[in-house]
Image (cartoon, rainbow, N blue to C red):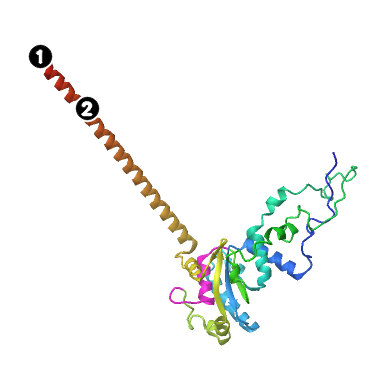
Amino acid sequence: MSAPPITRYPLTQTPSHRPPEFRKSQLHRQYTSLLRSTPLMLIFQHNNLKATEWMAVRRELAAALRKVDDNDSLIAEGIKLQIIQCSIFSAALRVVEYWDPNASANNSPETSEPSNPATQSSVAGIQNSTPSPSDPSFTHSLSRAAYNAVSSKRNTHPLTPLLSGPIALLTIPTVSPLHLKTALSILAPRAPDFAAPTRRANPGYHDPTTQVGLQKLLLLGARVEGRVLDTEGTRWVGGIEGGMEGLRGQLVGMLQGFGAGLTGALEGASRSLYFTVEGRRMMLEEQEGGGKDKGEGEGEGKG
């Protein structure tokens, strides 16, 4: 029995379909990681904001979000507003949504890592494995297998129509309706539920540079836990009273109401069945008693 082939590359630098040293490859990896680790992201169209306008918008957004954080959570530190390249982001989105690396890994041939002391490097018959991008054992996001699996999925994801033109993403590391509401009040205000801060409460928000930058931002939609929402759906998530605690309370109330309704329905059905059976039993007893009385009367008449 021959030993499995020895890999000729480091585990951290596996061969890729695209050269990993290119900037596009690094952006693809960055976007793939972002999509897998970020449950809530908002999509904005930006119309040629200047550097000073971006700085002013980010400054006011960060200041407003820090006020929402409590002592136990630091969600605001992980919220970022960044510009993306739509074509590379769309490719990363297809890999995340339509590519299953575990399924491909189960079908890949076994190889031995040369740095592992258990590898029998001196055994005769070891195959010489020259690294090739088409090797099915490569299951990372830049592999040839991932590219072939999603190449036929272009323009199929519901988020694809929004990824055209100049696009910016607001990424939130957790689904927090309170932080989402605050971000919408700054970036896409709409009274009365998402009203912008007043000039007295936040003078910097009404600075001309900030206002010009905000006028160049347009909310297109959001991706929440893998689901694509339009602007109204996004505002519905941000409008949940009490944040996640309020959402959990609503869910508990719905489950309790459903349980009470189910219990009442089962009790009503059992009572109905009991009354039906009891009524039928009494009817049979009356018929049986009537038959006995009739038989006794006929016997007495003959006597």
13 or 103: nearer the viewer: 103
Q: Crowdedness of circle 1 by 10 Å Cα count: few (<14), some, many (20+)?
A: few
Q: Secondary structure at mark 1?
A: helix
Q: Crowdedness of circle 2 by 10 Å Cα count: few (<14), some, many (20+)?
A: few
Relative image position of residue 48 (x, y in whole percent):
63, 82
In the image, is residue 79 part of the stretch drawn in magenta? Answer: no
Q: Residue furthest bottom?
A: 208
282 or 253: nearer the viewer: 282
Residue at figure coordinates x 52%, y 73% from the top left: 184
Give amino acid for label 1. Answer: Lys
**Where, quadrant-wise, is the N terminus in this rendering?**
top right
Q: Residue furthest top?
A: 303
Give amino acid for label 2. Answer: Glu
Q: Is residue 281 above or below residue 158?
A: above
The image quadrant that residue 62 belongs to is bottom right
Horizontally, residue 17 falls left or right of residue 206, namely right
Disc 2 target residue: 285
Q: Which residues are magenta?
A: 174-193
Residue at figure coordinates x 31%, y 43% from the top left: 268
247 or 203: nearer the viewer: 247
Horizontally, residue 7 falls left or right of residue 40, namely right
In the image, is residue 178 part of the stretch drawn in magenta? Answer: yes
Relative image position of residue 294 (x, y in whole percent):
14, 22
Relative image position of residue 210 (x, y in whole percent):
57, 83
Relative image position of residue 265 (x, y in whole percent):
34, 46
Q: Secondary structure at mark 2?
A: helix
Disc 1 target residue: 302
The image quadrant that residue 74 belongs to is bottom right
Query: Which label lies toward us, 2 or 1?
Result: 1
Tell me whether circle 2 and circle 1 mark residues in contact (CB < 8 Å): no
Residue at figure coordinates x 64%, y 84% from the top left: 50
217 or 171: nearer the viewer: 217
